[in-house]
Image: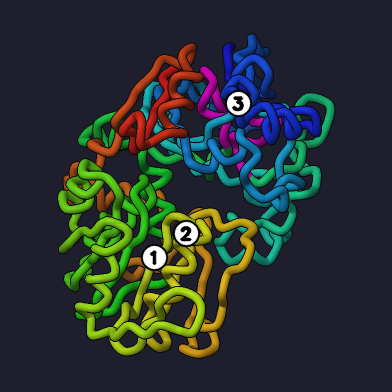
Amino acid sequence: MKGVTFNVSVAHFLLAKTVGRITESALHGLLSGVRMRDLPDPVLPGPDWVEIEVIAGGICGTDVSNLTYSASPAMEPFGSFPAVLGHEILGRVKSVGANVSKVSPGQRVTMDPMISCTTRGYASGDECPSCNEGLHCTCERAGEDGVTMIGDRPLSPGLTIGYHKDLPGGWGQTVLAHDTQVFAVDDALTDNAAVLLEPLSIAMHAVLRTPPKDPDPVLVIGSGTIALATVWALRAIGFEGPILAQAKRDHEQKLAIALGATEVVAPGPGARQALVDTGASAYLPVVGPEVYSGGGFPLIYDCVGSRSSVAQSLSYGSPRARIVVIGCVAEFKKLDLTFVWARELRIRGAVGYGLEDWRGERRHTFEIAHDLLVESRAPVEDMVTHVFPLAQYRDGLLAAANHRRSGAVKVVLQP
């Protein structure tokens, strides 16, 4: 099969940080660790596994950050390389192991790419505390070899398919998944809607873990897929309060309104005015930027994870506000944390998906997002703005990496 692989090395890191400032070839071109390769067809590791032909694979902001080495190196030990990239996956079942009954050949499926103790081969009752709780995205064995055998050796370390040397991702023609990772897709969903179930589930998990309280207003910061998915998730679970979406470009703002935002603003003066409209007053310290008192937002979802978005979240929160960090926050310099204590702010991270309490049941986030998407018939597929054949992955990466130039929201590759 063909697949786009990524290999991490010190040499590629140095090229990205030096030559990468001059030419994108050092980021995902001929000088980089990114290559289209001919690879052996993967083989089912056991009777509980599913072989899937990829229909579409999304490009995530995390992929762009990792390929440009702008992400923190802290998570590097929890991957294994070289890896076929892509963790946002829509496919069609090719074959199933003898123990698989939930899906069958020919079905369209999406998949949870995060690797649990079950996927690693540990028996029920021997899971790590996170997996035992149904929150496998913080699996505590991600840095270890698994029990599952790939040929004659144990499954390599890794937290997610797409950054795993033994389990190819969606930027290839074929993927493997454990039965517990695979979910059938309703015929009512288009391919462009279904390929978004992974990012939609990220947003849904964040919203269900830290839900809004009617009629309190909510601020969603971000212009990308996760921010727009968060707006959708808030409405999909039945929240009727005000949602202020902060997005940069006109088409992103229109998408936010279509998915349920009450109002949209651009970063800067528009966002500041929205804060003042909540009853906040501005004060100017002897040195430094404006600070505010009174008003503010009691719940903020930061879907960017940059220094400026985190600083804004801390500044715009009301006393005892809840701030949910969904964007992949990394290392920052000179981030003022004064308001964490001065306003008793509560900051919570959110990663991936898992088992949720929903309508009296314990269900996987993917199932909840899927069913609510079918129910709501929201136009989420409009977030897919660019589609490229897999062979044109470099064009896809260029579009995903420069939203201002390309106008991209979600870029999808089709093997």
Q: Nearer the viewer, mark 2 or mark 3?
A: 3
| Residue 110 image offset from top left, x and y in percent | 42, 36
Q: Nearer the viewer, residue 298 or 236?
A: 298
| Residue 190 image offset from top left, x and y in percent | 25, 31
Residue 326, label in figure: 2
Residue 301, label in figure: 1
Look at 24% across and 65% down and name the residue there. Answer: 244
Q: Residue furthest right?
A: 152
Look at 27% across and 75% down and name the residue there. Answer: 275
Asked if labels 3 and 2 touch by Cβ distance under 8 angstroms, the answer is no
Residue 362, label in figure: none
Can residue 77 be found in the magenta stretch?
Answer: no
Three-letter code, disc 2: Ile
Three-letter code, disc 1: Tyr
Can residue 165 be found in the magenta stretch?
Answer: yes
Q: Main secondary structure of the magenta part?
A: loop
